[in-house]
Amino acid sequence: ADFSLISSLCHPADRDSFEQAIADSAAALEPWNWEGRIVTPSGKLKWVQGFSRPEQQENGGLLWDGVLVDITDRKQVEQNLRESEARYRAMLDASPDLMFRLSRNGRYLDFKGNAASAHVPREAIVGHYLHDVITADVAEMFWHEIQQTLASSELRTCEYSLPEATGLRDYEARIVVSGEDEVLTVVQDVTDRKRVEKELRDSEDRLQSFFNATFETVIIHDFGKIIDVNPAAEQLLGYSTTEMIGMPVMDLVAPSYREAVRRTWQSLTSPDQPYEYEAMGVTKDGTYFFAAVCAKAIHYKGRSVRVAGVRNITERKRTEAAIRQSEARNRALVNAIPDLMFRIGRDGTYLDCKAERDGDVLLPPSQLIGKTVYEVLPPDLAQQRMHYVEQALKTGKIQLFEYQLRLTHNRASQLYRQLTSDQTLSSEVSATRDYEARVVVSGEDEVLAIVRDITERKRVEHQLWASAERDRLLGEIALRIRQSLDLNEILSTAAVEVRYLLQADRVSISHYDANGVSVVVAESVAENVLPTLGSVTDRSIYQEVQTIFERDRVYIVNDTEQTESPPVLKEHYKQYQIKAGIAVPIMPDGQFFGSLVVNQCSSTREWQPFEADLIDRLATQVTIAIQQSQLYQQVQALNAGLEQQVEERTAQLQQKMQELQQLNQLKDEFLNAFSHDLRTPIMGVSLVLKNLLNQSGDIVPITRSIVTRMLQSSEHQLQLINSLLQAHTGETQGIVLHCELMQLGLLTQVILEELEPLVVKNQAMLKNLVPPDLPLVTADPLQLRRVFENLITNALNHNPPGVDLTLSAIVEEEMIRFNFQDNGVGMTQEVSDRLFERYVRGPKSRHSTGIGLGLYLCRQIVTAHGGQIGVYSTPNVGSTFWLTLPLAISSVAQANSQEG
């Protein structure tokens, strides 16, 4: 330690004692302890207490380690105590308390004090007894206290109340032995103190009630341990009061915030200094929350502690973050909006301005703010703006209006200077801009005006209006042109309408024949303009026209004398006094018919783009009208063949009638087959039952074979009825499937094993070429079993004995394809196409009683699975029935899973 620095800071009166203490400690190598005053560089006097311990080093020097503690506050407290003691001594001397000397038997021996404070005169006290002066109960209590004091020789204190004219007064008496068989009693009026104590108790009760009832968490601590908490702390922190009392207060602070809290505590300059901070708290279950802490110093149960109010501000923090984010978004939106923004006061003063560029406003924002709209804008516009400002402030509703402002220079500020100097604006360099303004109340006596330049929008709107107007006129002209189907009338109407619309001198329509010779077939001309109707031009002009239209869809000439043109056209212009013109081709069905030509003969003309577009579109309408006329001619020609078409249609209707007859025949066959199939087993069962009834006796013997045949007949009937019901249900409601992942190779093997007896019975050969490792499908095994059994039994029943059957399967395009191939009798394409329809039976069936539902049900089942079914067949060669079923997992996914 550098004691020279400390010595230089010592108060002159304490420097010698400091240096002597250092010397004594160094000589004895004993710990050093010193108290004294220092003067800080800022001139502030402080009391400090130093603790240090010298340690001998190998080099013979001394190493001091220790601390200096600021005890200014403690010294101040000691000084205050001394001053307080002096004050208390003076107060005792000046005390108005009454003093009495009393004998053992309760007789007043002496009285000292302010007589004015006694409730009876002095002469009524000295020489009298307690019972003579005070009430009996108080006198009895006093006499008892005197006896106790004399017996114990200790100070006795008692309190009592005496009635007075002003009411009941409270007193406190201190009794001490003052001599043999006598005591000294000091009596103090404590009425006010009792009242204050009661008020304090009431106040403490109220504070305790508030402490317990407040929603804000309150923690009393000494910077180390928690001393007390209120019930709200339990709700916030999750600990019980018992758990929290004695807990380190820092355990309630999130680890990442503890150092910051310690720094806050360490920054306190006095024990009584209040502090506030925000930190992250942690509950018993580890939940973090934001807390605002406000703490003050109090004396609690005889010690100086801190009472800290803790408020959960997590929601407020979220709200503040949301507000900041919202403000950032709004600020970004405002900055991104290219519109001008002005804050304007009720009196028209510009309060603020936002513009992307200074040139967007009449004045730079720095010069604009503080001026009024009357100083900046033209008078009529300023008056208009102030009207909407007043309306917005009056109604509180947004005000929307449009206006125009004429700018005459590149920078709007130059316009302002001209306005303020009354200079005349030059119309030659002026440019009018359109603006839209929205005025909304933004504060007390102020509005926000958002101004958008809508010049481009207005221009587009005008163009759209003009385009719509041209479209309307074009529609009317097109309607008049296309009202007739006569070609000559169409062309004449077109020429008249185009000239009227464009106010041209001449409009003509030329037609070119196959040899390239053109004739003006329709024309409309103004007065004193040379007509060209019927004029003929040779092939030389045709070649030039073709070249022009191959290069330009619309040929425009604003000035024939200034435009480079072929000599033949130059001669044509001169001959017919043409000064300007537009020409477009007429090409119905892509074939060159002729041209629509507009001429200006009185003067040159600067043709506008919309005029060129209009001529082009009118030429299209003329083309359509020509096509309609040509179509009309074609319709006339087609009428001649209408009777032939009627005859053909009649033949088609007759064919449909034959098909209906075939359907009726099919229905009759189905009803006959169905009734036969139901009647046969019923007749068999009925015959058996009649034979049994004809036997004598009550008990009729019946063999198992008879029962079996009866059961088979019943099952056959039930199967027929079920097939019919299933076909109807499948048609109306769809097939109900109970799907599961399954391996078709295994299902096929099981079905073939079960059908083995039927195959043997039909002397057939069955080959199973279905791979055992087919991919999985999602299907209903019972329904698929019906399909497979039906296809196999169908092949056996509709072919002679000895047929060869082959069952195979392959995977293609995410589907499994099954083939059921036989070398039987086959069938025609007509039969194959209708084989899967309801009630259609296979040809040459050995069992003519079938009702034609088997293959129909097969198609319903396969379709319900997402597959298809069909047949390829050649008569006397055989048939191949095929069906497809979708894979449960795509082949790509299976390949990826196998690679993984």
Image (cartoon, rainbow, N blue to C red):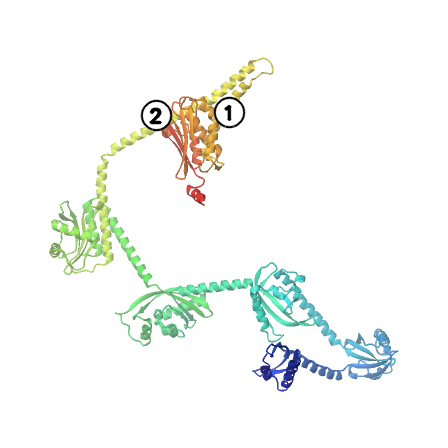
The residue shown at (48%, 30%) is: 750
Q: Quadrant of the C terminus?
A: top left
Q: Which residue is mark 2?
A: 875
Identify which amino acid the numbered label 1 is placed on: Glu
Of residues 630 and 716, the one drawn nearer to the viewer in this rendering: 716
Q: How many marks?
A: 2
Q: Residues within 10 Å of mark 2 (few under 14, many from 20)?
A: few
User: How far across and how far down the image is residue 214, in percent?
Assistant: 63, 65
Query: Callout 1: 10 Å neighbours few (<14), some, many (20+)?
Result: few
Question: Where does the image place residue 117, in percent across and percent down from the top left?
Answer: 78, 81
Dot 2: what SS? loop
Which element type, helix, strand or loop, lies under badge 1? helix
Q: Earlier in the sequence, mark 2 or mark 1?
A: 1
The N terminus is located in which quarter?
A: bottom right
**Residue sitting nearer the eye, 402 or 822:** 822
Q: Nearer the viewer, residue 270 or 769?
A: 769
Is 763 situated left or right of 569 in this image?
right
Residue 878, given in percent of the width and then of the height, sits at 36, 26
Label 1 belongs to which residue? 715
**Res. 76 visible in picture:** no
Image quadrant assignment for residue 897:
top left
Residue 587 shows up from this direction = yes
- Tell me: 856 left or right of 274: left
Give percent across and percent down for residue 175. 82, 78
Residue depicted at 35% across the width and 25% down the height = 877
Q: CA distance from mark 2 to mark 1?
A: 34 Å
Instruction: Using the image, determine if residue 746 lies above or below residue 551.
Output: above
Kindly identify the residue that appears in the image at 49 percent across and 21 percent down: 681
Mark nearest the camera among 2 and 1 is 2
In the displayed structure image, the side of residue 170 where residue 856 appears, left or right: left
Q: The disc labelled 2 sits on which kind of residue?
A: Pro
